Image: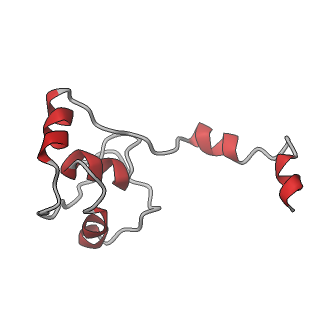
Amino acid sequence: MKAQHNQNIIDLSLQAYGNTQSLMAMLLANDISLTDTLEAGQELITPASKLKDDSIVQYYQARRIKPATALTELDQNLTEDTSCNYCKFFE
């Protein structure tokens, strides 16, 4: 399976298995961490799983849905903004 732009490993687990129950198997098979950034075009192993939800996988395939929820650079910049001082209430 190839990662598309802005996909993370959770997105690929949903696309391949219809759930995240096989996420750990994907992480181990690809020797990656849950927080690793995937590159567009990166090939990933999708091990066989008895936990696959075929109805969701078929739904995604029929509608050409490829979840892509990884944070963009803009998203990351927005979350690093500390100018609102909101967090100071929790210190």
Q: Is 87 displayed left or right of 76 in the figure?
A: right
- Closest to the observer: 80 or 58? 58
Q: Is residue 1 visible?
A: no
Q: Position of residue 19 (x, y in %)?
A: 27, 52
Q: Is 66 displayed left or right of 45 in the figure?
A: right
Q: Residue at x 24, y 45 (%)?
A: 15
Q: Residue at x 36, y 53 (%)?
A: 10
Q: Is 31 displayed left or right of 58 in the figure?
A: right
Q: Residue at x 72, y 48 (%)?
A: 80
Q: Position of residue 72 (x, y in %)?
A: 53, 41
- Closest to the observer: 57 or 29? 57
> Where is 63 relative to 20, above or below?
above
Q: Residue at x 38, y 39 (%)?
A: 68
Q: Is residue 83 visible?
A: yes
> Where is 30 relative to 58, above or below?
below
Quadrant for the C terminus in the image: bottom right
- How many numbered marks, from 0 up? 0
